[in-house]
Amino acid sequence: MVTIKDVAKHAGVALSTASYALSGSDKVSPKTRELVLQAAKELNYQKNGFAMDLKRKSTKTILLILSDLSGPYYSELIRGTQEVTLSNGFDLIACSSVGGADSTAYKFLQERRVDGAIVLDPNISEHLLRESAREGCPIVVMDRYVEGDFIMNVAADNVQGGYEATRYLMEKGHRDIAWIGGPSNSLGSQHRKEGYLKALQEEGIANTKWMLVGNFTEEGGYHSTKVLLMQEERPTAIFYGNDEMAIGGYKALREFGLSVPGDVSIVGFDDIQVAEYLSPPLTTVRQPKYEMGTMAAHLVFQAMGGEYVNKSYKLKIELIERLSCQPPRLAPNRGKGMET
């Protein structure tokens, strides 16, 4: 049976271009559309029969793959995704990749049991994403960029977020600013760190002795902060790659008899719900979590309907100023006597 891939190859165009041409989209030129239609005719490609076959195999289900189903960051993103999915008469299945190739996430992608997928999980390989994305099952990838047919990308502007958070601390007078980031395979964490380093470099600050990994967990933030405080010198401010690690940092600072922001100023990232209820309320970079979920879901349905969509979307962030930051004290920046 002749497939749309055969038509694209015969016409010498990308798979997505062939799809747009056959669906009548005005996003391809008349010349290209004619080229694709001629290829389809020569191969006796039956577009209507193929579309009916897709319709019969529709599962009316969208898959959402997250690296962690328990984290507070994900609740608003799931809510935004679910609202759009349900409004289109589809079900939403949320799962993680825990278990590797035997996980539900892998099976649903490999066995093509869904009509579309949204992936916020660095453990899902680019190869699997490209292999799984197809006409009738588009995939939206979040917080990283993956090139491929029927793959779209949505992310917050993490570089700008990291830059603005660090600039904010520097405008308060801080120069000794530590960074505690997420796991090494998180592109979002890498981009936030990139923004942090850019802000320091603009001021001629080449401080790299206070950069640790907290793995985006409260426990990780707690232990990394303790490592900072055990050093002879300590920073006057800490920028955490997410709010959960900042919460762990609050605990570690209290155990060392230090106050926020009196002794150490803190900035987080994400603006999870609990951030404004901490004592003191946490200054953080707000990600549009709900909006990211709704946009990702809308893109899936637009692509399923044959509409043209861009390959990449970047959403703006916002610095939320609360009470966890103040200018540094003039006392020497030493950690002596901080042990519990």
Image (cartoon, rainbow, N blue to C red):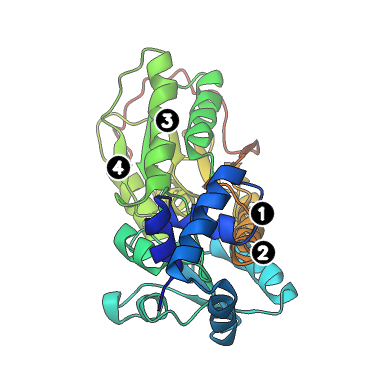
Considering every residue shown, the one lying at the far top of the view is 204
**Residue 196 numbered mark, or none:** 3
Considering every residue shown, the one lying at the far right of the view is 87
What secondary structure is marked by label 4? strand
In the rendered view of the protein, which quadrant contains the N terminus? bottom left
Q: Is residue 242 left or right of residue 127?
A: right
Alpha carbon distance from label 4 to label 1: 30 Å
Q: Are marks 2 and 1 in contact (CB under 8 Å)?
A: yes
Provide residue 170's location: percent of width, then percent of height.
Answer: 50, 21
Q: Which residue is mark 1?
A: 291
Alpha carbon distance from label 2 to label 4: 32 Å
Q: Are marks 4 and 1 in contact (CB under 8 Å)?
A: no
Q: Nearer the viewer, mark 4 or mark 1?
A: 1
Q: Which residue is mark 2?
A: 80
Dot 3 or dot 1: first in sequence order is 3
- How would you rate the neighbour count of disc 1 (Cα within 10 Å): few for under 14, some for 14-19, many for 20 or more? some
What secondary structure is marked by label 3? helix
| Residue occupying the point 37% across, 30% down | 235
What secondary structure is marked by label 2? helix
